Structures are given as structure tokens and as C-alpha cells.
Amino acid sequence: MTSPKDIKPPFDLTKALAKVQAAEDAWNSRDPKRVAKAYSIDSKWRNRDEFFQGRSQIEQFLTRKWVAENGYRLMKELWAYTDNRISVRFEYEWHNQAGQWFRTHGNEHWEFDDNGLMSRRDMSANDVPIDASELRYADASTAMSKC
């Protein structure tokens, strides 16, 4: 499994696709410490209406996120890339404590430093309630048993 920080700019199609897949794999681990290591120490984030900076705040955010978003399963797709930037579209599914499933649709814009660490992440997303029978990524039986 490739670590996202091992894939460094400048990006070509192969490296951009690998970076996106490595990020998807890391996020699907739901391990805030593992995911945070792919970001620069002073990485700047916008996640919906939250703005914060730094690995410790990223880790805190991800910890909160995965407590609230049960059964989280993510798909990322490369949208565009340049020398040190990548844009992706994503979908992920999750359910709240009451058992209501959601599919979150969104876009992210990433900027990387020379070491391959993400120095900036800008994310926009919308949540759509879905029925468990509509799941594309998550496994309802496994996810619900972990409530």
C-alpha cells in the first residue's frame, strides 16, 4: 500500500491517480493519526464551514468526524491535476446514531508541498439521506453492527 506522502509533485496522470487512490485508502482506514500524516505540519483546511490549520487540528477534526459518521466508506475520483495540485470528486456513505444513512457528494481541491505532503485542502459537500438498500460503498450489515 502506497503512502500518500510518497507520491510527490510534479504530477502526471499516473502519479495523480496514485495519489488519489492512496488518499482514498488512508481515509477508509478511519485512522485519524494515519490520515493526518499525509498533511504538512501547517496544512490549511476548509471543510464545509470549518476552517483550521495544522496536523493536530486535522487529527481532532477527523476523530470527531468518524465518531459522528458511522460505517464511513469513501470513493474518490480524480477530476483534474497540475504540477502540484489535484482536484477530486468524492462520494461517501455513513449513518448517524439513529441509523439514518447518508451519501455525501463533494469536491476537494488539494495543493502539495515539494515533499508530497498536502499543504492545503478545500472541501465542499452535500449530504443526501438514503435508504440502506441504496448503498454503493458501505456495507449496511457490517456498519450497523458497529453502532
Image: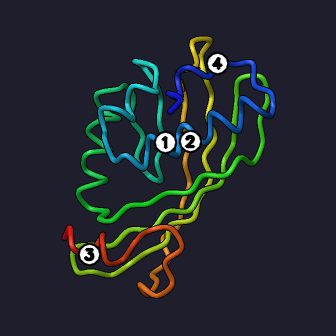
Residue depicted at 52% across the width and 46% down the height:
24
Residue beneath label 1, please? 46
Question: Of the residues tagged 2 and 3, which is closer to the observer?
Answer: 3
Work out whether mark 4 precedes mark 3 in sequence or the reverse, and give the earlier one: 4
Q: Mark 2: which secondary structure?
A: strand
Q: Of helix, strand and loop, which one carries label 3?
A: helix
Residue 20: where, in percent of width, then height? 62, 40
In three-dimensional space, the C-alpha distance between marks 1 and 4, rounded to whole angstroms, equals: 22 Å
Q: Along the horizontal axis of the image, is 29 left or right of 147?
A: right
Label 2, label 1: how far apart the Cα atoms are: 5 Å
Foreground mark, 1 or 3, reads 3
Q: Quadrant of residue 55?
A: top left
Is mark 2 in CB contact (under 8 Å) with mark 3?
no
**What residue does disc 3 label?**
144
Q: Nearer the viewer, residue 110 or 4?
A: 4
Circle 2 sits on which residue?
Answer: 122
Helix, strand or loop under label 4: loop
The residue that disc 4 covers is 8
Quick one: SS at disc 1? strand
Dividing the image into 4 quarters, which one contains the C terminus? bottom left
Q: Earlier in the sequence, mark 1 or mark 4?
A: 4
Which one is in front in this view, the residue at disc 1 or the one at disc 4?
Answer: 4
Q: Position of residue 134 (x, y in %)?
A: 51, 84
